[in-house]
Image: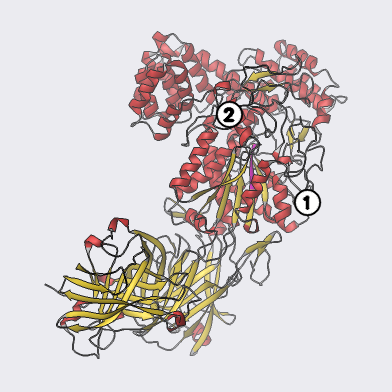
Amino acid sequence: MVYRPSVFRILLLLFLLFAQASGSLAAENEQAGTDWEKPAWDRDLALQAVLQVDTRRIAADTFELAKSASGPATVKALKDLAQQPDWPEPAIDAAIYRFTNHLRELPPFSVDPVVLDFLLGYRNRALVAHEEHASMGVPLYPVRAAARGLLNDWTRQQAALDAAGLIATGPDQLLALYAETRDPNIRAGIESAIGAANRDTLPALLEAALAMLSSAPEITGLAGRAAIESEDLAALSEVFVRGGGAALVELSRQAHQRFPKAELDQMIRAIADRAPAATAAMLTAGSGKVGNDKRSDGPTILHSGTGPVSRPEADEGTIEAWTEEDGVLGLGYPVPIPVDTPLPFDGFRSYDGLHARHQELAETSGIVHGHIVGTTHSGREIWAYQIGDADRVRRDGQAEPAMLTNGGIHAREWQTPEVVTGIMELFAEKRGDRHFHDYLLENVNIVLLPVQNVDGFMQTQRFPTQNWLRSDPFDIQNDPQPSPRDGRMRRKNMPAVDEVLATYDDHLLGIDLNRNNPPWWATNPNRSSSDERSLVHHGMAPHSEPEAQALVAAADLGPRSQLRAFTDVHSFSQVFYFHRTANRRLSNNTIDVLQTMSDHNAALPNGSLYLFDANPEQGIDQGFGMTNEWFTTSLGIPAWGVEVEPSAGQTFFPHNPPGCGADYGGLARNCHDGFILPESQIRRVREELARSFAAVYYRQSGPPSIAAVRMVDVPTGAVIFEAEWDPAGENQRTLYLNQLQPLELGRDYAVWIAYDRPMRWREQGEIVTFPGQSAFTLNFSASASVGDQALTMIENNARWVNTPGGAPGGYFRYRDDSFAAEFSFPRDGTNLSLVPEAATATLHNVTRNMTGQALDTNPATVVSWAAGGWAGYEDSNGMNTDRGGTDKTIQFAISSEAQPVPFVVEPGTSAAWYDPAHDGEGFLIEILADKRAVMYWFTFDEDGEQAWYLAAGEVRGNRLIFPELVQTSGGVFGPNFDPDDVTRTVVGSASFLYESCSSGTLVYQLPGRKGRFELQRLTRVMGANCGPYLGPPIREEATESGSWYNPEQDGHGFVIEVMTEGQVLVYWFAYDLAGNQAWFLGVGEIEQGDLVVSEVYQTRGPVFGPEFDPADLELIPWGSLRFDLNCNAGRVTYDGSIAGYGAGEIELQRLSSLDGLECAD
């Protein structure tokens, strides 16, 4: 296809405009965001000013001149028009806007390019306030968007003309052009030519397209259109199987219109197992029915459309349709139609499809939890969803911070429910990453309200192509860009409004839910209105509307006291806006959050640049009833609106987009097309904005702090220093310190510093800056000092760790939440002068998290939010400045004297262990071969009833690491026990640190709680040595120590210890008659080779946790046990003295053998 040179020049100009900005969007964000143009005109006054000049006549005269005059002469006339001193600015813009649209009457590219250059670079004189952002000016008559729309339309027409000659003569050339171009209008023109072509000319093109499709899915639209026009269902089925992208959505609609339902259903069934799931679901759902044929579940329609309806006068507007083709509401791309499918695809889902998706994720993901927070005027339920573990408690037991994101407040803004649903889908997809997303799921309460204005949203989807035009009483007569109302363009909710578009009397009614909020409700008549016909009618009272009340109820899921961010998602104009109060600190923190979100999205491969006004003094306490105003003023948190793309033609964007639908190759016939995002864009917008919302949630979860430090003796692998911040009540922590021996100058150690969140971002396995962040956020420094003098330190193999395992080479809770390195303090002059014998050293740590927040220098005060900023977030000087600094809270002993070799775990660590302060609960440890270990924890629940946990782990130096603490349920005592009923749930983790053969510590982590035990040895196992063995001769029965069970009754079993005194300790971990966990214990003797426990007990009384009181322990005689065992098998007989347990026998097999006590048959 060959274009005339003038067309090439225009296309090259557009390419250069885009390319000039593409490499530096984020870098220019701050400057552009603080320098955007302010509105100079009130919209109503601007419209009245247009009436002072006959803009229609002037535009027509200029158009006639353009048809005959040279390009430079036409440009001179346009410049003279733009500089008319006696005309009001809105009239100038209106005249040039009308002239631009007149050019559509001409053949493609019949105007000198200099005229188009002028129009594409035109700066509107009359800027009016954005609907939601009073301080941002947007064009009343977007000339640049209209000019770009004109160019797009001409490109489409010319492409169709040129393609018509290639369909038969050069199909390969046509395919190559379609595949190579990224201009949607060239592709649309080619498809249009195929639709108009003689059917006999299509087979060769279709055959070539199918051969190319698998390697070039970008030709899906062409291949599908050729198959449809050829009426070749077999070929079309291959397109749906092998093709991709948004073209499939439009092809699905065309197929449903073109082929008999029975034939199409047969094709769908035939490809169901071959096509992608989302494609199959979309085809099955169909393209959605339009108008009165589309009905969604809900209350009865108030007007059937068959009876008498009110009709407007001739000059009061008509119902008009949005079209792909040029026209009064021409889009220039397929009109999106909602599809009744829950699966995400390259298009828009219906409300029913979205709701089904939410409910499906609530049922299957484990991280989505639904709540009905209100009902609409029509009685439809309004749903909000908590994303995460829903316990509102962080891993460390502190209250979770909460985030609330609202969508669908304005009915016509279809982008927004998709974006909020995309957040839900992102976390459902990424759960289990043990990194960024799992951190948020386990430590943040994310509340999403996908569709606030359910009635209005469903009304727009009932009439996805239609609305009233020229019926808005606030437009002027013959307005060149009239405001469409109701149908697809309904903004407000629907009290006393029926669901029939043809009903004229109520089509302007409803309340703008973003004008129905305190404290600035009804305070600004220029931005909200008491007129019920107005697009911004504020209602009868603040929060008068059930939908507004539902948003308040969603905030209570936080709860409100824990909210740290609120976002109301709107469209369109590609900006953020927020309400300024006299609290400068809150404004500055809000700006920081918006900068993070803006930079993040701009840095994503398919992201966009979102700008905001970063002047904290702009418009203080000037509101008009928006949701973000209420959250900012009542809760003191960052609250803002996101206006989803496209842009609105603002000139402050560095890449200078034309605005409205023209940003995507649309016609921009009416700039309300910005509310109608092309289906080809919604997947990208949904997915990338979801990622940026996650970035905001991460930042507002709080700044980072050190969680733990370990120092490990490299030769032995023994931990000789540990420090960890433990929860100690609301918003408080205490520092646990345990140093087994001083660090020795000249000895090799490993240091491991863990933080309370993942700190680094990776791509393809390599650490990189978080999207949008600067390189300095990757800086890391760790040093040590004695007093104010730095110690000399040699460091190597410094790294962030993303493999499990804890210190010294694995992460703490999440990938990249820990930094590890090997180091030594050399015996040089500096260190020997600072440490002549022994000294106390201080660790100095400086780093930042992914979004650039520095460390909280005092982890003892848990960071929270208050008074518009971070509370408990101290800097290096101990001040709350929202900036953080250097952590110097960790101190350790260091010595120049030689230290003994640290203790390491030996086989004799197999034993029963307990904390004297918790006498009545304890731990059975089994050290197995190959540095494996098993732990059984016998304890109680919060009601003082028996509970037990088990875990398998590893021996590491002087530690036992159990990454998964398991609790069971579902069993029952006796013959009704069924192993299939037993459920094993990972509920936490545990780690033992032994300083000797007789003492150690345990730290455990359970949901919402963390605890420690100071352990002492309770038993010694015969033959399992820890240090020199001083007991009696080892009996043959000693090898029977270990775990035993019946494989056919997997889910309960016995732990046996033959002790050094010849006695036998037995624990039976099982269930009671009611199916609750139970454990039975007793100490017995060895009688003729059998292990006999004549007195077995149950216990109850103490409660789990810090309130445990040994005095509450009650021993309950239960019965007796007798074991007849050989090396690997045997049996146990039991006789229960408590009613219902009875007597019985169980065949046993060995489950574990203690290290050093293995036996052979």
* Residue nearer the viewer, 81 or 565: 565
Side of 1081 relative to 665 (left or right): left
Res 763 seen here: yes
Side of 1125 relative to 492 (left or right): left
Q: Which region of the structure is painted magenta?
A: 567-571
* Mark number, residue 617: 1
Side of 849 relative to 260 (left or right): right
Image quadrant assignment for residue 1044: bottom left
Q: Residues within 10 Å of mark 1 (few under 14, many from 20)?
A: few
* Residue nearer the viewer, 315 or 142: 315
* Mark number, residue 283: none
- SS assignment at label 1: loop
Query: What is the x, y in percent for residue 860?
Result: 59, 72
* Mark number, residue 461: 2
**1138 to 253, vertically: above or below:** below
**Residue for point 67% across, 50% down:** 639
Q: Amino acid at mark 1?
A: Glu
